[in-house]
Amino acid sequence: MSNSKHDKGEHYILTPKAEPFLERVIFNNRLVILIGFLLLTGFLGYNAVQIKPDASFERLIPLEHPYIVNMLDNRDDLANLGNFVRIAVEVEEGDIFNAEYMRALQEITDEVFYLEGVNRSGLKSLWTPNVRWVEVTEEGFQGGTVIPDTYDGSPAELEKLRQNVLRSGEVGSLVADNFKSAIIYAPLYEQNAQGESLSYADFSRRLETQIREKYEEKYPNVEIHIVGFAKKVGDLIEGIGAIGGFALITIILTTVLLFWYSRCIAGTLVPVFTAIVAVFWQLGLLRLLGYGLDPYSVLVPFLVFAIGISHGVQIVNAMAAEAAKGFDPLTSARLAFRQLYIPGMLALVSDAIGFLTLLLIQIDVIRDLAVAAGLGVAIVIVTNLVLHPIIMSYIGITKGGVRHVRNQGEGADRKWRIMSYFAHPGVAPVSILIALVGLGAGLYFKQDLKIGDLDQGAPELRQDSRYNLDNSFVIDNYSSSADVMVVMVETPPEQCIAYEVLTAMDNLQWRLENLDKVQSTASLVDVSKIVTRALNEGSFKWYEISPNQGIINATTQRAPDGLINTDCSLTPLMVFLEDHRADTLEEVVEVVEQFAAENDTDQHRFLLAAGNAGVEAATNQVISRAKDMMLILVYSVVAILCLITFRSWRATLCVLIPLGLTSVLGEALMAQLGIGVKVATLPVIALGVGIGVDYGIYIYTKFERFLLEGKTLQEAYYETLRSTGKAVIFTGATLALGVVTWIFSPIKFQADMGILLFFMFLWNMVGAIWLLPALARFLLRPEKMVAAARARKD
């Protein structure tokens, strides 16, 4: 009788033949399937524990963006302007012109020279021969290395060193404005001679142990500050170590909550076990496919675990209800599978598609995250809808769990009865009005939402992190900041020093230097002006570009490396910024693009952009274009899946509208918390939709079933809450509590993701419980639904 009742309730969702077939395949071959799971888990688990942290400069940037294409096309000519670290060696007492400090700087320079991954030909320090001074005397030009071969640390030599530094033009660049620190500039290779990518984790660790710790201990009067992309990523990877602690807290917390919910040992341990199996499968397959875990995708296993738990709760809930009716474990498992197969599959496919929309974004690290998340959800489909019910079919719900279901009593029924008034004709309009007010408030507050970073330094790390403190030191003490945008000036061969080219560059520099957020600029123009002035007795009246091409040729003959390429077809114009905030980058890019549009000719073109700020500007543009397109796609796909399953546009709206409200409120929250839309936070927007739809699908599936049985709308919702309301509320709370621990991560973007996902998981659950029935009151036509179902049956 019970079987026929369930079949009758589900006939409108799936044809009678397909479901029993799948059910028979799974439950008639339980032992074989379990052995297969055991073998696969052992193999994939072995691979999972060997997966390694991974990060690459090129995987973090939009390789197809025109700015990045320009940068990569000219990579060889910009060798010293790409991936680098800057090591500032500070003297705490006195200045750098003392023998002990210079000995420390020499030893640190030598140590950096031999670090694996350093481009030694581009290394710059006061101790390297490529840092020189030049002056014009009565006898002509004189110059040499800043630290001469005769240097012996004597007071006389130290005074000569001071004079050389002042004549070198390196004050503000390699030497601090207050003479209390000097920088070692180390450009890096992306790959070694064997083609292996630079390990940022290892390189960062060597910087800490072989440079910072070693020499701060050896020279107590010295403090070392390190900035650069490789160091930032290394610190992010180091922060991944804290994830293990969060994982343990999440598992313990989830286990405790599951037992409180089910009062059943099996109903607690089996969902946790299958969710952990899904994580091991995911990590193992990622390693076999050649992926590692970068700082962004390292949180995906948390999401896979959370999704596995959320769907596992539905199975436990359904099995407990069937066991309370007196069914044995196998029958209870089959009936639970029969009830949840379609909504579970629909929800998980929606999750997967929500993740896979991230593939549209032309940044490899986000695409890697999409692959990892999509793969994880595909695995959860297998572990939750096959492994979980099979294990439970052997163990069953314990007597304590069955007793807990039977003892829910009138108190629980009264709670569900009160909540069922969300579907009441008098309450529903109030709910809709509140939702409209919330939508209006969300649209108003989300106007301040920005694309890109909103903080100085590395916004991925907390402002009091060692890296950001080091970055603040460099910004405060040097005129050339760590945030550099490089404009590439392209000309025909042998034309990069033509008067017209240098004049156009000079005009652009003047425009840029008048922007508030630009600290300074540097180019071949400055070299030509300095030498022209020097040739004219140092008079500032001659600090100009000479219209005489012969003089220009002479003044640029000894231009420093990096300011001119070998065939004189490219010269960079470097723009040093106070920060890489989104509004700063937008302002600089707008000025350069406008100038290029007005001044580009056949003889010269101004191309954006290299440098870390140029990469950030390109990334911001890609994310800005992709955000709305990604949301449109994910909502469209979820809508199509709901239409196929429920065969009703009204039902689809009931599920999607609460999701849309959550998306708007989530963006408003980001704007008010000062969280920009960037590589780290963009995936959260898709995740909120992909995972959030699960609640509405489970609620509506039960809701529709009771409506088709002829119940009134409010009564049908009451029965829905009785059967699945607790599971949905518990799932939302568990998911939210699982990610809220991220708020304490040393990595700020993980904390930001934790805040946003916490809000979205909770609010999507609230929307499904509160707003969906109110929408159903206005949108659904129960009598037509029943007639349509009967017509399909006939």
Image: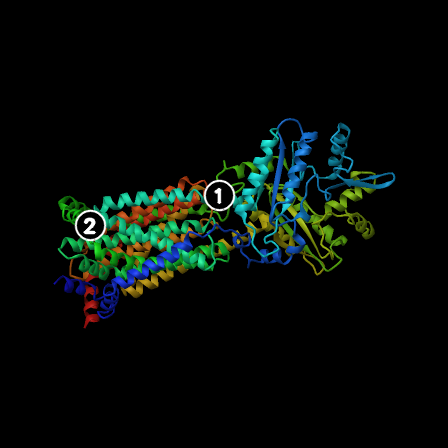
Instruction: From the viewer's perspective, tell me whether residue 743 is left or right of residue 109.
Output: left
Of residues 596 and 196, which is closer to you in this image? Answer: 196
Answer with mark 2 or mark 1, whichever residue precedes in sequence: 1
Whether residue 283 is visible, yes or no, is no
Q: Dot 2: within a 10 Å radius of its alpha carbon, few (fewer than 14), some, or many (20 or more) residues?
A: many
Of residues 279 and 785, which is closer to you in this image? Answer: 279
Q: Give how far across and how far down residue 11 sits, in percent.
A: 21, 66
Secondary structure category for the residue under label 1: helix
Residue displayed at 41% across by 53% down: 48
Nearest to the eye among marks 2 and 1: give it. 1
Secondary structure category for the residue under label 2: helix
In the rendered structure, which amino acid carries the disc numbered 1? Glu
Residue displayed at 21% across by 54% down: 395
Furthest residue in direction left, as rendered? 1
Decide: is 575 above or below 657. Answer: above
Q: Give how far across and how far down residue 388 sits, in percent.
A: 27, 56
Snapshot quadrant of residue 752: top left
- What residue is pinned by disc 2? 420
Q: Quadrant of the C terminus?
A: bottom left
Instruction: From the viewer's perspective, tell me whether residue 491 is left or right of residue 653.
Output: right
- Mark number for residue 221? none
In the rendered structure, which amino acid carries the disc numbered 2? Ser
Residue displayed at 15% across by 53% down: 324
- What residue is pinned by disc 1? 238
Furthest residue in direction bottom, as rendered? 794
Q: Give how far across and how far down residue 654 sits, in percent.
A: 29, 57
Q: Give how far across and how far down residue 676 sits, in percent.
A: 47, 46
